[in-house]
Amino acid sequence: MDNTIRVSVTDRQGQVHELDAPTDMGMNMMELCKSAELPVEGTCGGMAMCASCHMYVESDHDLPEKSDDEEDMLDEAFFVEDNSRLGCQLHLTNELDGLKVKLAPVGN
Amino acid sequence: MIQTDILIIGAGPCGLFTVFEAGLLKLRCHLIDALPQPGGQCAEIYPKKPIYDIPAYPSILAGELVDRLMEQAEPFKPGFTLGERAEQIEKDDEDQFIVTTNRGTQHRAPIIAIAGGLGCFEPRKPPVPQLADFEDKGVEYIIKDPEFYRDKKVVISGGGDSALDWTIFLAEGVASEVTLVHRRKEFRGHLDSVQKVMDLAAAGRIKLMTDAEVIGVDGDGQLASVEIKTKADGNHTIETDHWVPLFGLSPKLGPIADWNLNITKNAVEVDTFDYSTNVPGVYAIGDINTYPGKLKLILCGFHEATLMVQSAFKRIYPDKNLVLKYTTVNGVNGFEG
């Protein structure tokens, strides 16, 4: 189907959620996870200002480079790895079909 | 004891607008906020970001919105208890609430309006095992008095301005040894602070560890060392008297969770008739409340504040009739002092 992609999100208990995501709604991964009621806070609402939508990208999709804002916010996150991203900065496009992400653990 | 009509918990946009709407009904307000300045998230997280959905403002910076709300509230002389967290709530025998902060400041009011947004902002704590055992025993999340670190060995973690500024300050004749640990090579602080830190490191006056993070703490009751994982050459144990992790602030619902309010998913349930909670006299407005169809928008919070003060008035003055008066007809008549 046009304008819908399938992404998979592994939650913090290891359960995999296959989600159908619209690519014509201007949504990002943080919003998609929230709408699926997955435990992603998205405190700042998607401005790359809180790091509460930290996730790991586990597929080898060609993703847009991290902006300075995103790098800066990852400084305030924990369990940061080379494949760490902020979900709010991953905008859902047709190219991301088959994307696999895993939610990062949360601190105290 | 501070006495007021409506005690507002949270000095964000919603709390500030409540002062104005309450003032029109001749009700006085006092605000408590855990942050040192009014404005809540708008001032703390995104003061320089434009907001586009405030009616009649095609675009306004969050910080500017706060300034204007302060200006709008000013005629009604709100009181502020800032930098203190509302901790405890109790009722006295005259049906008034007593709210005590973490610093012991007491407030008394017949009405409580919780406008707490996401909760109170607290330092983000790194997920290091046994960290809690060393809090205030060598681990501090905020530097209150730099003299505390005189002639001590200090490890600082973080990559922002506070980590850089304190590293520079403590390295210049305060601490005996300063180590700055950061997860990557680049820093996000001001360029001149970054340069200064680089210079101090080059001169051997601080130890700079990049691509590194603190993963463990150890000591016998008092912090004695931290374990640092580096990308380049494995783990290091560094002897230290203090570790100061500076990873910014994140909101927590905090003590409100224990106020016997009905809470769903970190939000306070309210009746949309007047935004009252299950505790008579306690209301919740803005991002902290929830009800069917709730949208977390500043716009909606303003509406909630306006309806809430009407209900609060009727609770304080059950025998008085309230007639809606338009500001265009009556103007804004503030309080004398």
Image: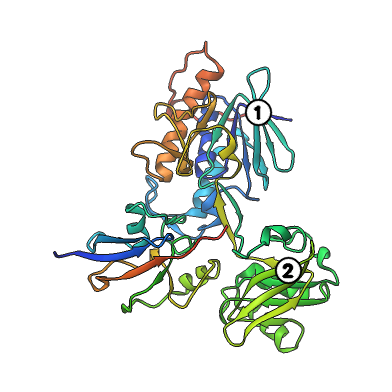
Q: Calculate the distance from the C-alpha at mark 1 to the C-alpha at mark 2.
A: 40 Å
Mark 1, residue position: B90
Say what secondary structure mark 1 lies in: strand
Question: Residue B197: where, in percent of width, then height?
Answer: 68, 80
Output the chain of dot 2.
B
Residue at the spot 48% in from the left edge and 44% down from the top edge: B266
Q: How is the image coloured?
A: rainbow
Question: Residue A90: where, in percent of width, then height?
Answer: 35, 68
Occupied quadrant, residue B187: bottom right
Mark 2, residue position: B218
Occupied quadrant, residue A96: bottom left
Question: Residue B108: where, in percent of width, then height?
Answer: 67, 28
> Which sits in the foreground, A75 or B192?
A75
Mark 2 closeness class: few <14, some 14–19, many ≥20 residues within 10 Å:
some
Drawn side of residue B3 relative to residue B189, left or right: right
Drawn side of residue B196 relative to residue B54, left or right: right
Mark 1 closeness class: few <14, some 14–19, many ≥20 residues within 10 Å:
few
> Which sits in the foreground, B222 or B85?
B222
Under mark 2, the amino acid is Asp
Q: Confirm whether residue B332 shows in the render.
A: no
Q: Quadrant of the C terminus of chain B?
A: top right
Q: Nearer the viewer, mark 1 or mark 2?
A: 2
Under mark 1, the amino acid is Glu
Say what secondary structure mark 2 lies in: strand
Drawn side of residue A3 relative to residue A26, left or right: left
Residue at the spot 56% in from the left edge and 19% down from the top edge: B316
* Badge number at residue A71: none
Residue at the spot 27% in from the left edge and 60% down from the top edge: A19
Residue at the spot 46% in from the left edge and 56% down from the top edge: A44
Q: Is residue B188 above or below residue A16?
A: below
Q: Confirm whether residue A33 shows in the render.
A: yes
Occupied quadrant, residue B8: top right
